[in-house]
Image (tube, rainbow, N blue to C red):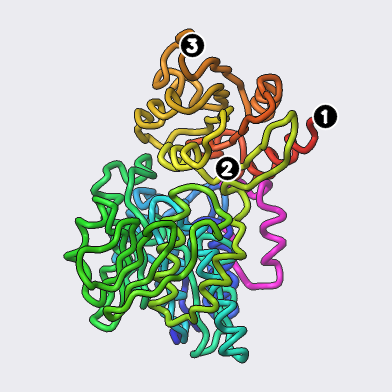
């Protein structure tokens, strides 16, 4: 354990991760300076959360003066590395860290770290459920801890975690790009363009994601998607054991999971075991098939029981805001996929349904390509409702409405509430009404969760 007593730590960003880490460090005796660009008047409730601790607040900007005498600078997930104060810290030789890095350095238990461009939250939640079942059935005195980029930051539970517990963490590229420690089991689900507004290039984004493997050793385990072209390119970075997952049966006897004739299989130590039938899985879509194949591989790597794996999958209904069924109204089924903040994720959602689709898409763009999204809309979406900052961008990608060709209509709305009303006007019995924005929520909401909650509220208010 690190001795934090008397160390000066500057925490940049008073968001969820920053608050949890500030509390932990202050309780360990560190002199914490919590810095946020927002004005003091906007942080009253946030400051109240930490009012019981001796924390110095510096708000309204990022003055370099707070770096004087600082031993460590920690970043909340949304803080860019090219922020002037971060660059200045690096120039002064002050190390950078974050809550996930410090958790990995200090936790006594093994860690499963899960990243990828899509499916992180679903896979983390599913593996977490399997882990909890395994520990309830086999190790009732120990516990599985689930969090990271989803749920609560695990740093806040560090003092409760025991050596024989296990932690399941979702890790974002923002967290990974500065980390210097890898989890025992490191998972990359897929690598497709995402967050290019921050990382600028696909190469930089891939480098950030693959950093989850960089600090592994020969006794560690890497789990990669063998059907994903970009993931195959980083096989040479693996230092320990490799387990792959994918739809098609592997050509060799390597440890892997695969799908064949309606069943999901695990191949381990040259033996093949059937895990579950595909028609027993609740979650729709090919993308969720990949998530479940990944979860089986992860669970096998962690030595979870077959009983826990089966029960975890067969009872898993998904996570809020990811293809979440809201209600039936107007003869149509309404789904909330607010977590889809990139075109690739919206594509996966659209491909999950074979019925007529009314798609609500929009939000704020992340400098990502919309060409494949537009092609799929022309194939599968009957009515497109666009909203938010990306209205013109999406409409330019789709082009004009052509008679008797999908999409039959395109409606442009200022915000999501108006988009819900417009979708309600278009709906016909048998339709799927799908919120899968493809853009972030920051043009209108705090985060994708608030966007999903408001969408759910407005859909439930339809009469």
Magenta part of the chain: 38-57
The residue identified by callout 2 is 338
Where disc 3 sits, the SS reads loop
Q: Is any part of residue 11 visible from this angle? A: no
The reply to whether residue 107 is visible in this rendering is yes
For the point 46% across and 19% down, the residue is 395
| Residue 463 numbered tag | 1
Most foreground residue, 186 or 445: 186
Quadrant location, the C terminus: top right
The residue at the point 49 percent across, 58 percent down is: 278
Taking the spot 45% from the left edge, 87% from the top edge, the residue there is: 1
Nearer-the-camera pick, 416 or 138 = 138
Q: Name the residue: 48% across, 8% down.
A: 403
Q: Nearer the viewer, mark 3 or mark 2?
A: 3
Residue 214 occupies quadrant? bottom left
In reply to whether residue 50 is colored magenta, the answer given is yes
Q: Which residue is mark 3?
A: 404
* Mark 1 → mark 2, Cα distance in angstroms: 22 Å
């Amino acid at each position: 354990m690190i001795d934090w007593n008397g160390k000066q730590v500057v925490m940049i960003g008073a968001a969820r991760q920053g608050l949890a880490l500030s509390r932990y460090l202050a309780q360990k005796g560190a002199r914490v300076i919590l810095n946020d660009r927002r004005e003091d008047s906007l942080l009253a409730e946030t400051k109240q959360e930490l009012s019981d601790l001796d924390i110095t607040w510096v708000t309204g900007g990022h003055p370099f003066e707070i770096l004087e005498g600082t031993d460590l600078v920690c970043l909340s997930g949304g803080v860019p590395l090219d922020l002037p104060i971060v660059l200045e810290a690096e120039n002064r030789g002050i190390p950078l860290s974050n809550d996930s890095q410090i958790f990995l350095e200090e936790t006594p238990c093994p860690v499963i770290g899960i990243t990828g461009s899509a499916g992180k939250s679903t896979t983390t939640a599913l593996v977490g459920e399997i882990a909890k079942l395994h520990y309830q059935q086999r190790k009732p005195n120990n516990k599985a801890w689930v969090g990271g980029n989803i749920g609560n930051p695990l740093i806040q539970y560090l003092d409760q975690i025991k050596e024989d517990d296990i932690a399941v963490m979702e890790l974002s590229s923002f967290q990974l790009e500065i980390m210097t420690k890898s989890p025992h089991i490191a998972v990359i689900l897929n690598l497709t363009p995402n967050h290019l507004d921050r990382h600028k290039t696909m190469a930089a984004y891939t480098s950030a994601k693959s950093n989850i493997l960089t600090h592994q050793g020969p006794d560690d385990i890497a789990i990669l998607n063998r059907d994903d072209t970009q993931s195959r390119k980083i096989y040479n970075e693996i230092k320990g054991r490799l387990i792959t997952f994918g739809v098609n049966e592997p050509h060799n006897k390597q440890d892997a999971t695969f799908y064949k004739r309606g069943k999901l299989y695990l191949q381990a130590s040259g033996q093949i075991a059937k895990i579950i039938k595909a028609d027993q899985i609740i979650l729709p879509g090919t993308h969720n098939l990949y998530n479940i194949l990944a979860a089986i591989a992860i669970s096998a790597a962690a030595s979870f029981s077959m009983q826990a794996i089966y029960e975890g999958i067969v009872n898993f209904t998904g996570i809020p805001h990811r293809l979440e069924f809201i209600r039936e109204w107007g003869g149509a089924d309404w789904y909330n996929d607010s977590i889809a903040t990139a075109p690739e994720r919206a594509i996966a959602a659209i491909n999950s349904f074979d019925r007529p689709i009314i798609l609500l898409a929009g939000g704020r763009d992340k400098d990502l390509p919309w060409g494949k999204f537009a092609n799929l809309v022309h194939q599968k979406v009957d009515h497109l409702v666009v909203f938010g900052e990306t209205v013109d961008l999406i409409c330019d990608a789709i082009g004009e409405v052509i008679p008797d060709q999908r999409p039959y209509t395109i409606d442009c709305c200022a915000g999501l509430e108006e988009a819900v009303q417009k979708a309600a006007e278009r709906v016909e019995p048998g339709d799927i009404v799908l919120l899968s924005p493809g853009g972030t929520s920051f043009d209108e909401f705090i985060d994708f969760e608030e966007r999903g909650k408001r969408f759910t509220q407005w859909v439930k208010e339809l009469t």
